[in-house]
Structures are given as C-alpha cells and as structure tokens.
Image (cartoon, rainbow, N blue to C red):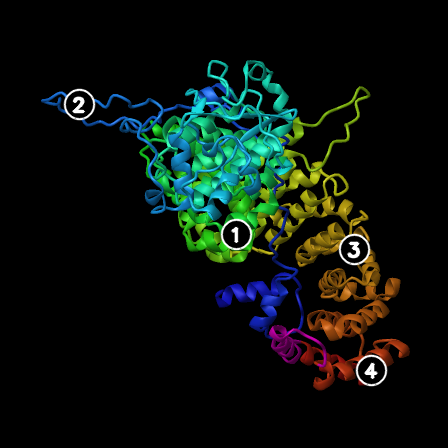
Amino acid sequence: MQSSKNKKQYTEAFYKSPLAVQKTSAEIINEARNTLRTLRTQRPFTPREQQRKLFGSASSRTPENRPPSAFSLNASSFESVESRPVSCTRLSPLDHKPKLLPSATSEEEHPVSPAKTPVDSEEIRKVSNARAYLFKTASCGKLLPDKVLLPIESKRQCSEEQTAIGDISKNNNEHFTEKLTVQLNFKDEYVALPYKENHSKIAGKDMCPKMTNISPASQLSNQSDLVNREESPSPCLDNTESSKPLNKSEDNVENLCHSCTILYQALEEGNMLGKRFKRRSLCLKTLYKLVDVASDPLGLKLAKIILDLKVSGKNLLNVCKLVFKISRNEKNDTLIQNDRILDSLLEILGTEDLGTNTEAFLYCMGAIKFISGNARLLNEMVSKGSVEILLKLMKQINEIDENDARFSSSGHILVQLTATLRNLVDLPQSRCKLLECGAIPELSLVLERHMSDKDVCTNVARIFSKLSSFNDCCAALADCSRCYILFLALLNKHPKKQDLVVRIIFILGNLTAKNNQAREEFFEVQGSTDTLIALFQYHCDADANGKMWNDSGELKKLKHPSEAEDVLIKLIRVIANLSIHPRIGASLATNPQIVALLIQVLECKSVDECEELVINTTATINNLSFYQVNNSVIQEKKLYIAELLLKLLMSSNMDGILEAIRVFGNLSQCHEICDFIMQRKVYKFMIALLDAKHQEVCFSACGVLLNLTVDKSRRSILNEEGGIKKLIDCLRDFGPIDWQLACLICKTLWNYSESFTSAQPCFEDHDSDTLLGLLTSFLDEELALDHNFDNDLRDYHKLYWETEFKPVAQKLLLKIQN
C-alpha cells in the first residue's frame, strides 16, 4: 500500500482540480489507467528452421566443435556381438583351464551347447506358440521361413519341414507361419533371406526349387544390399537365379515392412522383446543387414524392433542415428507416429545410463526435438510423459560436475532438450506439468551452469519468454529469487547476441509488469540500472550505424522494426514498467542518461517509421512525468519534450496522439507548459479531439482542458471551437459508462462557470437545458447504475459515483439552476 503522502501526490499529479474533494482509494487506482501504465509488446519471433538439424543456422557452435547432423550409416556400422561398457574391475586369473564348448558360434551372445536334434512336440507345447515357432525355425538355421504358406497350400509342398513346424498345434501353426515368413519378390521369382549357413536340406529332404501361388499381401520388399555377396545363395534358387541383381527387388519394400510388423507382433505376443529371446543375436544380425535398404518406412520398422530388443553400446548409438536420420524429413512424422517410435526413444532417456551412452542420448534427443516440431504430435508427446522424462534427464545433466569430461558433451544434449521443451510449452497441459515438476528452478540452474553456452541460454530464454506470458508461470518465475541476477549476468556477458538479449529483456518486461515486488527485486540488484543504460546506448548506436543510404544520399527503406529497434522497444517497456513503483519511478525520472536516451528516440524516430518504438517511448515519458520531484530531468526538459510531441500530435496515428495528450496532461500542471499550449494553439487541437468519439482520447483531452481552466484567464477558450457543446456531448455519450470521465467533464464545466457571477448565465439556454437534463438523470442512483457492469466492477462504479461524481454534479446543477 502507498503511504498517505504518496496518495496525495498520486491524486494531484495528472489533473490539478480546484475542487477540494477527498480522493478514494478506488478512484486513485482507476486513475492509473491514464497516469501510470504498464506496456505490452509482442513476444520475439522465432523463425522456423528450413532444415532439421542438431544445431540450427544461428548456432554459436562452429562445425568442428559440434556433432554432425549428416553421417554415413549402413549395415557394417553395427556390431554382430554387442559391445558393453568397459568394467574398471581387474579380474583374477583362473587356476584351472576351463573346458570349451566345441560348437559355440560368434553370432550368438552367449556360447551354446552343440546343435541338438529338434525338441519334441510335447516340450514345445509348454511355451507359447510364438516362442516355439521361433525356436524351431532358428534351430534349423533360419530366423524366418521362406514363404507364406496358407493351410491348403501347405499340403502341396514337397517338404513337410518347410510348410509348417509340424509339432506346433494346427491352429496357431498357420497363424505364426504367416507372421514369421520373409521373402523377396524378384519379378515373380521368390528368394528366401540368406544366412551364412547353407541349409540346402532339412531332415534329409531337398527344399522345393520354386514357390508359386503366393498372395500379393505376403510379397516382400526392396533391399538393394540385402544379401552379403560372400554368403551362400538361398537354397531355394539354382545358380542362375541366385546371380540376378538384387536391385530388382526395389518394388518389395512394402511387403518387407509388413513382415517386420508381423515379426514385431510375434515377438511382443511371445514376450520375447528385450533380451529374453534366445536367438536374439541372430535376429539382430539379420535386421542389421536390412539397414542398407534405402527406405525410411523400412528403417523405422527395423529401428523399432532393434530398440525394443534392448541393444546397447555401439548398436544403440547407431539405431538412434538411424531414427535421427529418418526424422530429419518431416514427411516421415506420420510414419514415426504410426510406428510408436517415440515410446522407444523416451524409454532410452528414462532407462539407459547417460554416462555410458552420451552420444546415443544426443541423437535420440535430436530425433525427439524434430518430432516436437510437429504441432500435431505435441499432445501425444505430453500424454506419454515427455515433460517428466525430459526434466528428469535435465536434473541428471545438472548433477554433472563442470570439471567432468562429459560436461561439454552434455551441453550438446541440453541444446536438443531445451529446444524440445520450447516446443512443448505451447500446450497448457505442458505448462502445468512444468510447474508441478519444478522446471523453473532447474532451468535457472541450467542458465547458471552453462552461461557461456549461447545456444543453451538462448533456448532457455525462449522457454521463459513463452512461460512469462502466462500469469501463473510468470508468478512462479518471479518467485525464483536468483532469476534477476542470472538475467542481468546474461545481458552483461552477451550484450551483442540480439536473439538472446531481446528475449531476456522481454522476460524482464513481463515480470515487472505484474507486481511491485518484482520491480523492487530487479531494481535492487547491483548494477541493474547501469546494465539497462548500457544496452540502451549500445542499441541506439547500432540502430544509427545500421542505417543504409542509397546512391542519391537518401535513406533506404528498411523493414521495421529492425533488430536494434526491437531490443529498444522491449527495453523501454522495462523502464516504463519499473516506473510504476513510486520510489523507482522517482529515481528514474531524475536519471539524466535514461531521459536523454528517451529524448534521443523521439528526435530520431517518427511514428510512421517505427510506431511501437515511438509510442512506447512517449508512454514511458508520460510515466516519468507523473513524478513531480526535485531534480526531475523530465521537468527540466519539459518545454523541449513538448516541442517534440507536437509532431506526434499532428500525425494520423491515434494511438500516438493519445500518448502525446497524456504527456501534456501531466506537464500542463506547470504554467510554462500551459503558456506553451496557449501560444502554439494546442488547446484548439484538444477541443477538436472531443469529437473523436474515442473514450480515452476524450478523457485525456478533457484533462488538459481542466488544467488550463484552473487559471481564470484561460477559461474563455472553451467558448472557442464549440468547446462547451462538445463537453456536453461527451458527457451524454460516455457519462453512464465512465463516471471518471463524467466527473472530469463536470469539473471542467465548473471551472468555466466560476468566471460568471450569479446574475450572469453560465451557458446558453440550449446548453443549460441539455446539461440540466443529463445531470438530473445521472444523479438518480437507480438509473445511473442501471448498466451492465461486470460484477467485480459494479461496486467500484457505485463507490466512484457516490464519492466523486455526485458531489461535483450536484454543485454544478445548483449553479445552473440559479
């Protein structure tokens, strides 16, 4: 609450009324609509990157100091045997020589016993049909059978072993045989997937040389490098068939994708995802070979299976790179959504170890960032717990010591993570989760720890600029006591990085627009005013130096606002918002550097050239001119300021005109400005504006006329230009909906009437009759308050009517009646 001294100053600052009427607190608050006002501005625009990359075109990272967005990836990039993190534990040598199993293969994760004969059907029935099928198929040397076999067709095949796994129950045998069959269509000739082992015969029986009568839905797809040329050809083909170029399979990608879908379903139904699948290594090795197929849909299918088989080490990195590479094309967003790739990526962030998988996390996070760039997928991301997972990862990164070798690489991950959060905060449910999970303190800690990383800081600033536009988020940010220190430190460290500076200034403008506590906390940070002045001066100079002249010596027409102008707009808004606080406002009004820079803007800019900058500057001068304090620089330069405002008054911009009138309303409490208004005929302009039919313009113009009519020698100006009639018209038009304006008009008319003795009529007969009818009507409480005011404003309007309007109107009414 303001002190009584400040209240008195507040009530007399804008319009100096000769009527000794005690102001109420409600009236004082409402009067601030034209006396002291916070300013609004647009949030800085973030252009969309033309290409999806780890680091955008505006990144401060040099190419040699950042991971690549483009890279080579093929089947040979994957490891047949998964690498594991190196253990730091030294093992003791064994005292005896272990017995080695003679038939262990390098393709499996763990050594297995020598090949056994297929288990009998009774054993197989003990496990799921899916697991049984995969077990018998893999034990024969093939992960997938060679053909989709329908129930009728199975009786026609030459090999009982090839048509179905005979020991599996009949119903499920047909189902899983169709699910787990992969074949390539080479112009009506079908080639089975090859493996190193050439099983040309099964159980002593030759396989059929050719398969026919296969439905189109079961045909499989393109893979330009599917088969390793050094491997044995498929047993289903003779030498002529096996030598055909593999590029003939380019029309079969759709069927390969379908087969991958069936394989995933079988693994999922058989509870064989993760590392529980005995033939997992063989399955992965086959899937890795298909990476060479130039198909994004197939690549996503492969990535989904590989990720859910829980690979690690280099293979985890490569599959994350695969998804990243595919997600760079926004046309694949629908495929990513349909294949539920996001679930697997989020699981990596939530379960894998950051320390041993830093690079994998980077590309995983990069892919998630690309996905979040699609507004249609944001709701799905939030529903899958993306916000919580990302914040958990951020906390892990914040715990890394700055001297740790991983600290630098963690910054690359933070760039992707904060860019993703920047996209997510557009959703209300995301903002709620961010507040619930304590995101603001964590983001502030990111700023503090990575202050030298311009990319990270800019992304966090973008997040805060969005959050601070909402009242609840802005209040939460204001409660973070260190945020003002951090923001000022960033401004001092990166004063020339426009996209960062403009957002920090925008955030400060939002914070200081809300409450006095935020204004106090910012202003009390050491060097806060000096930082604002330095930025103000730097961007004024940058704007002046950035002007371009054509060959004829004329200034080229540039797009406005320029980058420097945009910073100035946001920065001047901060000064205007700070000046709402009585102590801070009085201090700023006495600061010669700030006032000089504001005047410089008015000198150099026109409202037609840069509307928002000029209007914000004028509004800030209006706020500072409110404070009638000793050593006020505004008061010292009031005549020069009034001269500068004349060109704004003469413009066609109504918002600019309104701001200029408001400044004249404050300055016209001084005799020098009143004389200036009279000498330059500015009062005629004020009278003319009463016809504007614009409520705020009429209010401000009437305030200037009220200040002029305090002096009896100037009251006759209301007789010029039909001033009395226009005031009465304003009273009729706006009185019932704006008692403050109605009170102001009555005070102005009262000032005018004091020039006449009781024997002389104050107004012409027609004006007297009109005014008498209006005042009588407005003094009827039931009629006066019979308007559709909002419930929260109804009590205020009633209070203002009773304490402010009614006494003045009654006094004026008696004057007219007498």
- Left or right side of 684 for 463: left
Specify which label sits upstream in the sequence, 3 or 1.
1
Specify which label sits upstream in the sequence, 4 or 2.
2
Name which residue type carries label 4.
Gly
Residue under pointer 1: 512
Q: Secondary structure at mark 2?
A: loop
Residue under pointer 2: 99
Residue under pointer 3: 678
Q: Nearer the viewer, mark 2 or mark 3?
A: 2
Specify which label sits upstream in the sequence, 1 or 4.
1
Residue under pointer 4: 773
Specify which label sits upstream in the sequence, 3 or 4.
3
Q: Is residue 66 above or below residue 215?
A: above
Q: Secondary structure at mark 3?
A: helix
Specify which label sits upstream in the sequence, 1 or 2.
2
Name which residue type carries label 3.
Met
Residue name at image x 46 percent, y 36 percent: 305
Q: Which residues are magenta?
A: 786-804
1 and 2 marks in contact (CB < 8 Å):
no
